[in-house]
Structure formats: structure tokens, C-alpha cells
Image: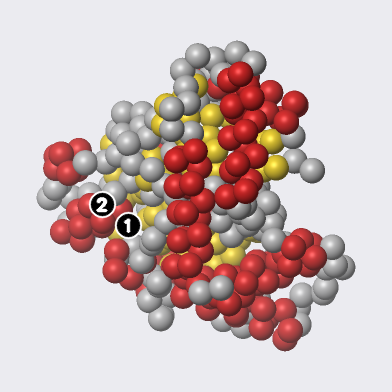
Amino acid sequence: MMLNFTVGPVMSSDAVRAVGGEQVPYFRTPEFSAVMKENESLVKRFAKADDDSRVVFITGSGTASMEAAVMNVFTPHDRVLVVNGGSFGERFAQLCRIHDIPYTEIKPAMGETVTAAMLQPYEGQGYTGFLVNVHETSTGVHYDIDLISGFCRRNNIFLVVDAISSFLADSFDMKALHADVMIAGSQKALACPPGISVIVLSPRAVERVQTNDVKSMYFDLKDALLNGERGQTPFTPAVGILRQINVRLREIDAAGGAESEITKIHAIAQDFRDRIVGMPLEIVSRSLSNAVTPLHPLNVSAYDVFTRLKDEYDIWVCPNGGELSGRVFRVGHIGALTVDDNAVLVTALKDLQTRGLL
């Protein structure tokens, strides 16, 4: 079996995998509606969302929910700020272009976070929306969401947060941050198979969805909200994965909720970072998430490290795409991992070092 340190899909618990082996049930039933209502309630609790918030489960990857959010809450009359510090920020910029939403990019340098100085020029400039991937997974940078939230509140800006790779790995209080939309995915810290993404809508976002006219059938969230009132979806969802999400949410709840999951992931991340001190690996982010450690090997190609670990040690780490592929690989700390697994990975890295391959 491969040991999986990627940032998604990640390793699932035995209980989640057991559900994956069952026959998928018919879903237009009171029983499945009850599962969906419980999913909504637990996601709201873990996101610290307002009681009147709503949760929509989209059958599609995280990008589907990014697109649905952009289409349903913004129009060509908006002016949106987009934090573009990597490939996922770039995706939000691309979505604004496709859907004719006027936008301005804030571009932190690789590995750098967003600062007050970067936001300052946009104070009082009439912007109406803000799009940010709170954890830019491609570079392993966790942005200062408190800073961004304060800026949005001062300027009455509608805040959409992609928390796909940080939900349940880093603290996130939707209500305290006045975040209007939060997006999550099934295959990150939720540790289920890919195929479902999650949109949490504040009461203000629900209102905006209801008044916006969306030119889409599949991504019209008005329809999703209406069906969701009875624990259903407009179209056939990924029923099996939604049942796995239910088992996983209940598992997290029984273990102490979002806080204990975040604490566990933080401890695994810290343990790994402590173990690699003194090795020829440079952490390239100035603002780390608990979910991942981005590493630049000082002597060899990052992609070669990924390939050797995969082919010779049965370990997956996460390669980077594009221009970073030779420079950076990432080690994830989410999913069913333990500090013992960290020890296996670090032993393999030290073996590569001994062989002159790190």
C-alpha cells in the first residue's frame, strides 16, 4: 500500500472506507434527506457559521463550487479584488474573466502573505467583492484572513473564501470573520474521496443568491437551496460520497469537533517540520498552514524526489505543476496520517540523502 502525503485525495479512516464498499442506496428518501440535513448541520457547526446560514453540496470538484460561488454572488456590476498568489488564485481570476466580472488582482510574491500595505491602495475605492483562497495550496501560503476580513468589513465588501485545503486543518470562524461564502471539498481534511464540494452561504449570501439571475442549470444555487430545505439536491448527487462525508463528520464530532481535528493536524505538521531540521530542504512559505509543508530541495530536482519516493519507497508526496515542478514538492499533513507515518517518510528522505539523491 502506498503511504499518501499528498494534499488530496488523502487517506481515509476505516469507517469512511467501509461505507465506500457498500452498495449505493436510492436517495429520494426520508432516510437520505436526514443524512443530508445532518451533513448541513455539522458543516455549519465546524465552520462556525451563523445559525441562519445554508450549506449546498455540489457534485463536482472544488473548482465547481468556486465557479458556482462566483456566478451566484457576483455580476458584471461588481468590482472584485482577487488575491492571486498561485495557481488557485489564478483560477478565481480566470472565473471572473469568463463570467465578465470586473476584477483587480493583488499579487503577493511566491511564498509571501497578504499585507496591510498591499490592501491599503484599495481602501475606499468602491470595490464590492473579495475572492481569496485562504490557503494557496500551490505554494503552501496561509493568508492572514483576519487582516482581509477587517479590510472587507471597513469597506463593506462581500467576502468569498475558498477554504478547500484549510477547512478542518486551520482555524476558521465564518461568523467572526464576517465571511459571506466559504468553500470546502470532500478530499482534503474531510478525508473522503473527491467528487463533492461544499458551499456555506451566510444569510447575506443566501439573499444575494435569491436575487441574482444565473444563466446555468447545474450551478443555479436557488434551485439547490430550495431542494436543500428538504434535505435533497436538484439532480443526482454523489450519494456514496455524501454518506461517507456523513460518517466522517460524525467521527470528527465524536472526537471533539473541528478544534480537536485542527489540533491533531497541527501536531502532525509540527512533528514533521521538527524532524527535517538540518536536512537540505528549505520551507518556502513565510506563512504556513497546518495542512501542508512546501519544500525546496537545495541540491536536486523536486520532481525527482517525488518520483523516487513513489517508485522506490511506496510513498506519495505532492509534486508541483508548472514552473515550480523542479523547485518545490509538498508534504501534506491531512487525512488518516500519524507521527509514525512521518517517521517512515523522513527515514526515506534520509536514505535518499545517504544515496546522494537529496
User: Of callouts 1 and 2, which one flags the residue occurring earlier in the amino acid sequence?
Assistant: 2
Residue placed at 33% from the left, 41% from the top? 287
Quadrant the N terminus occupies = top right
Q: Nearer the viewer, mark 1 or mark 2?
A: 2
What's the amino acid at mark 1? Answer: Leu
- For label 1, the crowd category at 10 Å Cα-Cα, with few meaning under 14, some 14 to 19 and many 20 or more, is many
Task: Provide the residue designation for mark 2.
Answer: 148
Neighbours of disc 2 within 10 Å: few (<14), some (14-19), many (20+): many
Q: Seen in the image, is 113 located left or right of residue 270?
A: left
Evaluate if marks 1 and 2 touch, with contact meaning CB atoms under 8 Å apart.
yes
* Residue 256 against residue 98 in the figure, above or below: below
Label disc, if present, on residue 159 of the rendered structure: 1
Q: Is residue 112 left or right of residue 92?
A: left
> Does 111 sit above or below residue 271?
above
Disc 2 secondary structure class: helix
Residue 101, quarter of the rendered image = top left
Residue occupying image coordinates x 76% and y 78%? 28
Distance of label 1 from label 2 (alpha carbons): 9 Å
Name the side, left or right, on which 275 lies relative to 193: left
Looking at this view, is 134 or 347 the one in front?
347
Residue 145 position in % (x across, y down): 30, 53
Residue at left offset 18%, top offset 50%: 126
Kind of element beneath mark 1: strand
Residue 71 lies, in percent from the top left, at 46, 53
- Name the image quarter holding residue 22: bottom right
Amino acid beneath label 2? Ile
- Among all residues in the image, which is located at the extreme bottom? 30
Evaluate whether residue 104 shows in this view.
no
Question: In terms of depth relative to the viewer, which is nearer, 240 or 277?
Answer: 277
Please tell me in which quadrant of the rendered image residue 358 appears: top right
